[in-house]
Amino acid sequence: MDQEEMINKRQILKKRPTGIPDENTWELVESKVRDLMEGEMLLHQEFISLDPAMRGWINQTRSYIAPVEVGQVMRAGSVGKIIKTKGKTIFKEGDYVSGWGGVQNYCITKGENFYLVDPQKANLPAYLGVLGMPGMTAYFGITEVGKIKNGDTVLVSGAAGAVGSIVGQIAKIKGCRVIGIAGGKSKCNYLTKTLGFDGSIDYKSENVTKAIKNYCPKGIDVFFDNVGGDILDSALIFLRKNARVVICGAISQYNSSEKISGPKNYLSLLVNRAKMQGMVVFDFAPMYGKAMSDIAKWIEQGKLNHREDIFDGIENFRETFLRLFSGDKKGKLILKI
Amino acid sequence: MDQEEMINKRQILKKRPTGIPDENTWELVESKVRDLMEGEMLLHQEFISLDPAMRGWINQTRSYIAPVEVGQVMRAGSVGKIIKTKGKTIFKEGDYVSGWGGVQNYCITKGENFYLVDPQKANLPAYLGVLGMPGMTAYFGITEVGKIKNGDTVLVSGAAGAVGSIVGQIAKIKGCRVIGIAGGKSKCNYLTKTLGFDGSIDYKSENVTKAIKNYCPKGIDVFFDNVGGDILDSALIFLRKNARVVICGAISQYNSSEKISGPKNYLSLLVNRAKMQGMVVFDFAPMYGKAMSDIAKWIEQGKLNHREDIFDGIENFRETFLRLFSGDKKGKLILKI
């Protein structure tokens, strides 16, 4: 295909949302792909990663990363193939790369923040999940921040999600007792029957506080939280002495148009000399290599399961993205474009 | 005085309070001091320590220490003189000791959890303050949990109190910039003019959020919190990357009969990879010696000021105790009995 004929479809941030993003939040815009300049490459994107953190990136608030500006392409992780280069470039035509390509079909880049992936070793969507940001988040969150050790009781919220499912499995590999909280019978069965969790709690049909008490009679050593709100409150009640709470996310709060609900039981930290610590995966970038090699090994050994839930079409970006918050997806959420 | 004539006045927990302790919470009971048994000592108590933590000890909830039971003498730190012994005892007649004597005039003990103090080195009330539990809490809280280092910006709430005033001064000694939050002009002046704080915020007359922004334009490295509630919320907004929040207490919440208000801005921990950690001073008991010697040295060098606010009479226990929560006291609150 001649570059002159290439049309790029892009999801542009149109208006910052209050609460749940609606049809005015993004706009699908088409434009011709421009000519490459010296050192640039044209990336044909195949899969886009949809992650809860993206909701934060469209707020106009101080955060660990600059907000996406109105008029800009929506930021997203992606994986695709270099189809054209000009002059001396970091990657060559035919290379598969992953990085921050954004929600668009084509991306022109000099290669900063992209890295080479091998489609022979894993399928492309896996590079956005278990071998991508969610996998890295899970790995460093539970080992470096949660500091799990053999025999710990670990509770994970959002346990059937892209991060939570890997957190729990790594904790199992490291000799912990793992209980997961997820929404619905099917996800809970997935945790215990496929992923090997020691127990699961269905927050949609069970009293979470009672269920934690039941599954963790001696309390919790590590709580890995993706959810926040009432579930965080319940977990705090059961902290053991010197427990660690990893704050990875708060998906229950991201679309709140009211003030965020703070953890009412935070004084459990005092009583139990416990620690609540936030994490941002980018801080661990220098160690991604080690994590990827461990995770790849565990997958090969059959110790670590992963699944991706892939939806189709850049036009369906918003509807698909919202599945993160309704819980209406299985495993890592990905958009094929 | 013959022991047969000795009358012990004791404040007994009568009814667990909801909210602020009222006249039904404790009862003053008199009884004759019983005869000593082998290995026992009779301690004549002179000063009782009044601390915010005592409010927690009369709740029937799981905590770091067993609750005081209804019918028991109210638990309190104390300092006094051994006036009688029987048989082989740990201390001898005439020794001054500090420990958990409770709110009563006389205490019969075998000496567990008491230690010798030297009335020549410091006045007796100082052993309940700067050289006692509040001093130890401040020392280990700011150095071991807060992990202050030279150049840090440190914010302290309850800064004119027994713990906060020492926290801020130790941080100054260690080369930090220190801002204190306290209630009222007089306390604020005490912080900056007597204790050498770099700034003070009067939460009674100032907008705390704006004031923190003003005094800490680059944000906060360590927040030492004795107060909780809205002040904790405000401080969280200004955390720097890798900041530490030391949860020492939450005096704004202890008498709340409603649910405790959780820190709404806790996701600042995530964005800033920050840590919120609880502490209980007893964990540091093996290191008290080092802390006492450092503190005594700083007092001698004129680098560390302390003051005790001493009220009189065991019958006035409750009214005096409530000054902790109204803020109506200066420095470490002590009851002379």
Image: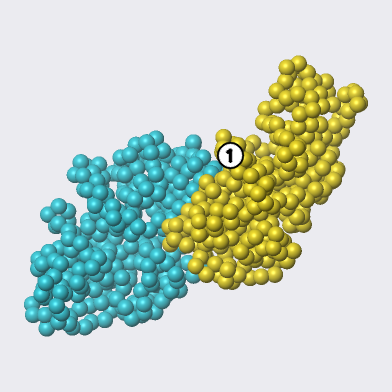
Chain colours: A cyan, B yellow
Q: Residue B232: tell me if it is visible.
A: no
For the C terminus of chain A, give its image quadrant: bottom left
Residue B202 sits above or below residue A288 on the image? below
- Quick one: label 1, few (<14), some, or many (20+) residues within 10 Å? few
Judge by depth and name the residue closer to the eye, A56 or A146.
A146
Q: Residue B168: tell me if it is visible.
A: yes
Rendered image quadrant of residue A32: bottom left
Rendered image quadrant of residue A195: top left
Which residue bears the numbered disc 1? B290
Judge by depth and name the residue closer to the eye, A290 or A1.
A290
Judge by depth and name the residue closer to the eye, B303 or B131.
B303
Residue B220 sits above or below residue A290 on the image? below
List x then y, in percent, for residue B295: 63, 45
User: Chain letter of disc 1?
Assistant: B
The residue at 12%/64% (across/down) is A95
List x then y, in percent, for residue A13: 34, 77
Secondary structure at badge 1 equals: helix
Residue A230 sits above or below residue B293 on the image? below
List x then y, in percent, for residue B149: 50, 54
Q: Residue furthest left?
A: A1
Rendered image quadrant of residue B284: top right
Residue A80 horizontal side relative to residue B69, left or right: left
For the N terminus of chain A, give its image quadrant: bottom left
The residue at 33%/39% (across/down) is A174
Residue B75 horizontal side relative to residue A335, left or right: right
Give amino acid for label 1: Lys
The residue at 44%/61% (across/down) is B241
The residue at 40%/56% (across/down) is A279
